[in-house]
Image (tube, rainbow, N blue to C red):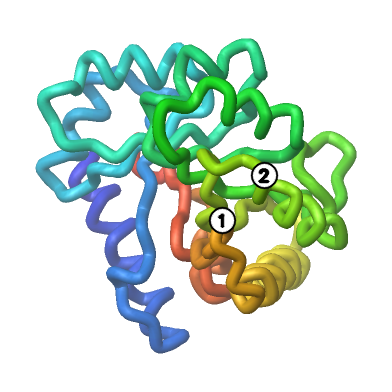
């Protein structure tokens, strides 16, 4: 079943890229392993999936220890409480949810090297979602220049679960436009070339809009 799911994901990613004249390798698939054991996650590695995403610090550290013999790129994709920064920030390759300056200051304080961060943007302006608002993104990222150990590699957003395809595409497109705008500013601390958006239910739409990183969990491990 896992192999069937993997083949379906690869086919869907490839077809989505072809529709918009993108190369398949321009999209990085992050396997979201939060709902499975380390043993189950390990089964993805022979199929070429070595980017793993976790949204809880304890789960990420547990899996990292269990899979230490593999060359895995670790993505922390969930909200990070300031009190937990010291436990995890030097163990991750990418952090996908930088959304306020107090968190940035704590990362700067605890980091032992440059941390590659995505700024989380609440494009849909949902009250239940974290993230800076679209029209505040430039000012927020500009303010991050004072933290030399934070590199803004891109932007991240999550679409509403109940959004229509048209609405979701509009939100993703807005983020892509904002990414291009910030990238054009040529800020040294914020190359901002990447777009982390799209999950199991909407990653095809995200690829169409320009996603460079999609976060897929359920589609890997469904029965």
Residue 188 visible within the image? yes
Crowding near the residue tagged with mark 1, few <14, some 14–19, many ≥20 C-alpha atoms within 10 Å = some
Residue shown at the point (45%, 57%) measured from the top left:
213
Query: Where residue 195 sits: x, y (%)?
Result: 54, 61
Query: Where residue 175 sits: x, y (%)?
Result: 69, 66
Residue in the foreground of this view, choosing between 176 and 106: 106
Residue that label 2 marks = 146
Residue 157 sits above or below residue 24 on the image: above
Residue 161 visible within the image? no
SS category of the residue bearing label 2: helix
Quarter location, residue 42 = top left
Residue 165 sits above or below residue 221 on the image: below
Q: Which mark is residue 33?
A: none
Query: Where residue 173 sits: x, y (%)?
Result: 68, 73
Residue that label 1 marks = 189
Residue in the foreground of this view, choosing between 43 and 114: 114
């Amino acid at each position: 079943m896992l192999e069937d799911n993997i083949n379906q994901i690869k086919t869907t990613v490839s077809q989505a890229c072809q529709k918009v004249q993108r190369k398949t390798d321009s999209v990085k698939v992050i396997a979201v392993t939060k709902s499975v054991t380390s043993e189950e996650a390990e089964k993805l590695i022979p199929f070429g999936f070595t980017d793993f995403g976790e949204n809880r610090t304890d789960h990420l550290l547990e899996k990292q220890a269990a899979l230490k013999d593999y060359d895995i790129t670790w993505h922390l994709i969930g909200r990070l409480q300031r009190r937990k920064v010291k436990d995890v920030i030097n163990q991750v390759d990418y952090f996908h949810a930088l959304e306020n300056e107090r968190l940035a200051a704590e990362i700067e304080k605890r980091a032992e090297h440059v941390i590659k961060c995505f700024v989380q943007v609440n494009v849909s302006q949902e009250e239940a979602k974290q993230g800076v608002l679209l029209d505040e993104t430039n000012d927020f990222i500009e303010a991050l220049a004072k933290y030399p150990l934070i590199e803004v590699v891109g932007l991240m957003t999550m679409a509403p679960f109940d959004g229509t395809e048209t609405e979701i595409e509009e939100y993703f497109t807005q983020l892509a436009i904002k990414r291009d705008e910030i990238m054009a500013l040529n800020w040294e601390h914020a190359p901002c070339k990447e777009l982390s958006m799209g999950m199991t239910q909407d990653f095809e739409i995200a690829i169409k809009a320009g996603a460079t990183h999609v976060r897929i969990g359920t589609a890997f491990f469904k029965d």
